[in-house]
Image: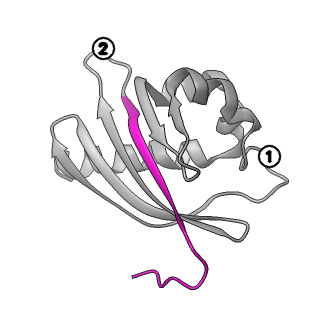
Amino acid sequence: MDSATDDVNQAIAGELQLMDPGVRASRERVRRLLDPEFVEVGRSGRRWTYESMVAELSSRPGRSPDAPRYEPSDISGVRLAPGLVHLTFETVLGDVRTRRSSIWRKRDDGSGWRMYYHQATPVPPGVDTA
């Protein structure tokens, strides 16, 4: 496996961890996966920062193993540069479909791959997946 493929696979692994209810419920685990400079534009249009996401993710949907979970599909990625990966995919949570885009970066401080940016766009009912 080449380094570009390995980088993409590590970013995908991090993305999947952030969808895991056990991770979402743990502020400490979320802190390790989000970059300190993290920013998200959520599906509602709300702008999230590292601090606001760490504080609120444990109360957001997908946090309970007994409730609906995020179901990802069509995850793909490309290494933009060494230490920088862009992922695109879709999720379904209950009956809500969302297209997503994330940028992951590997920091030089040894903390590993962390999500730097995330964009979530709602998909209206009836819109094709293509």
| Residue 116 within the magenta-colored segment of the rendering | yes
Nearer to the camera, 61 or 9: 61
Specify the principal SS of the magenta part: strand
Residue 124 image point, x, y percent: 57, 74
Q: Position of residue 63 (x, y in %)?
A: 74, 43
**Amino acid type, residue under disc 2 in the picture:** Asp
Q: Which residue: 59% across, 51% down? A: 44
Is residue 19 shown left or right of residue 129?
Answer: right
Locate the C terminus by quadrant. Answer: bottom left
Residues rendered magenta in the picture: 113-130
Left or right, 125 with respect to 39, comes to right
Q: Which mark is residue 76?
A: none
Residue located 79% across and 46% down the image: 64
| Amino acid type, callout 1 | Ser
Label 1: which residue?
A: 64
Question: Given contact means CB atoms under 8 Å apart, are the residues at marks 1 and 2 in contact?
Answer: no
* Residue toward you, 117 or 30: 117
- The answer to whether residue 122 is magenta is yes
Residue 77 image point, x, y percent: 30, 57
Label 1: how many residues lie within 10 Å, few (<14), some (14-19) or many (20+)?
some
Identify residue for label 2.
109
Q: CA distance from mark 1 to mark 2?
A: 32 Å
